[in-house]
Amino acid sequence: MFIRRRKNKSGSTTIVIVDKSKGKFTELHNVGTSKEEDRILELIVLGKEWIRSKELAIQPELDLYGEEREAKSNELKAVEDVLSNIDNILINGTDLILNRVFDRIGFNEIKDEVFRKLVLSRLSYPASKAATVEYLKNHFDEDINLSRIYRYLDKLGDKQHTKVQKISVIHTREILGGSIGVMFYDVTTLYFETDLEDDLRKTGFSKEGKHSHPQIILGLLVSLDGYPLAYCIHEGNKYEGHTMLPVIEAFVKEYGLDEFIVVADSGLMNNANIEELERLGYKYIIGAKLKTEKLSIREYICSQPKIDRQMFEIDKGQGRRLLVGYTDDRAKKDAYNRDKGVRRLEKAYRRGSLSKENINKRGYNKFLDINSQIHVTINYDKIAQDAAWDGLKGYLTNTTIPTEQVYEAYHNLWNVERAFRIAKSKIEIRPMFHFTRRRIEAHICICFVALKVYKELERVLKITDIKLSVDKVMNMAKTITTIRVYLPQNKCYITKTMIMKRHQRIAMLFDEKFWVNR
């Protein structure tokens, strides 16, 4: 159907509706006649409306957007149905990764979910035990009572301590190719937020500057690359040099080690320790105290030319070798630190605040003297003598390995220092708020396992070329959620971990296949 304008002899125009069928034209409707152009246009509009009404009468109007509207409606309904059936939302990205690492090491041999939760919480949300309870409830819907945690800590005891060390050693041996080789030992202090002492928590020299707080001494034995092997806990006022031999001897006997080298800092060693190491047949590399050597050796060391990164060797007899090295960088650092310390002494001297209580061997107070009038002065001759040792570092060993390997082994001691930094800054092993020996020991045990999990995840990221630190991976994983939906018709649950585009760099860590043979 269409509109036709038909001219009349009278000069008017008639608007008619015409239909063409089988080559014939048929007038269906006379809309009207007029001589005025405005009226004619109105009649054309009326004609179009007539055509439209007739077409609708013959065939219902096609809804070109009906299917789209229906699809949108169905989509909304489907989403609403899913949302209404969501049973739980867990912010568990970190746990999904850490659980796999925990199991991979072998800690799943310890069949206790409280232990697992406490370890993983130290990595994802290090906090007090009370705050940990809230964290587990809010993020994982885990309702673990605080009293239950404290009861668990009370029963953890020495048995668990031995078991976690054994698991850690077996795994470390495996990733190192079957042999421990070099072992590094060092100690740190852990303070308590209290003024009360007991048989374990004692005030002593604090590496953290908390001299007025009771503390304990924590000794840590690690392998190459910093994988934790064993630990020991001692009273806070114990001489740190007496902490090493017991833990090493017990470790060697427990795991039947024969070929290994113990590496330790000079602060842990004295003649008695060295003699005991040799009596037990242990090989060692320790930092040497060059300034306490006998006069002939000191004179020989100072007579040698100072060439950057050059080492020389002194045979001390009885199979002992003293290796001495010099670097320009160390010399600059030694000079800078001494000048800074001397300026502080000079400032105190000008104020008149130096007294005989300052006469001791701590730090740069060693440059102080006291005269017959009981006046404290700065001895600049001692300062000049000290400068002669700038840049020098000594290493005492009873091994026969090349000099370069001795140097490299000793400087891997930073692995222990880094392990302590991780334990203190990431796992937040201190300050501690426990007051009984058993709970303190349990807390240290949990942190030791958390450290091992951290180091294993770090290793996995490195060997799989995921160019992210553990901390960055953990931060990204904290934004990953798992949704659990209940299907009423199927009477079952479906869980889905939501890996978004921003998570693609760590997406493989959530794939079961990724962890095969890692």
Image (cartoon, helix red, strand yellow):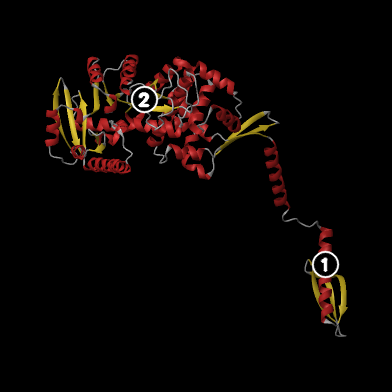
Which quadrant of the figure contains the N terminus? bottom right
Q: In the rendered view, would you say 461 is above or below 53?
A: above
328 to the left or right of 26: left
Query: Dot 2: what SS?
Result: strand
Q: Quadrant of residue 136?
A: top right
- Give the image location of residue 153, x and y in percent: 51, 19
Task: Say whether residue 69 is left or right of residue 330.
Answer: right
* Residue 258, x across and y down, in percent: 27, 17
Q: Tell me the residue that label 1 is attached to.
A: 49
Depth check, mark 1 against mark 2: the one in front is 2
Given the image, on which type of amino acid does mark 2 rest?
Leu
Q: Residues within 10 Å of mark 2 (few under 14, many from 20)?
A: many
Marks 1 and 2, the one that precedes in the sequence: 1
Residue at 11% x, 36% y: name it: 303
Q: Seen from this angle, which residue lies furthest bottom? A: 10
Residue at 66% across / 28% down in the picture? 492
Quadrant for the C terminus, please: top left
Q: Quadrant of residue 486?
A: top right
Residue positioned 19% across, 27% down in the render: 401
Can you give x and y, in whole percent of width and height, for residue 424 in the image?
43, 32
Q: How far apart are the two marked residues, 1 and 2, measured between alpha carbons? A: 93 Å
The residue singled out by tag 2 in the image is 220
Residue neighbourhood size for the residue with mark 1, other residues' Cα within 10 Å, grouped as few (<14), some (14–19), many (≥20) = few
Give left or right: position of 501 versus 406.
right
Relative to residue 139, is residue 201 depicted above or below?
above
Q: Please, what secondary structure does the residue beneath circle 1 have?
A: helix
Q: Looking at the picture, which amino acid does disc 1 mark?
A: Glu
Residue farthest toward the front in the current orientation of the protein: 373
Foreground of the two, 363 or 53: 363
Q: Is residue 356 visible?
A: yes
**Residue for point 25% across, 27% down:** 286
Q: Nearer the viewer, residue 156 or 57?
A: 156
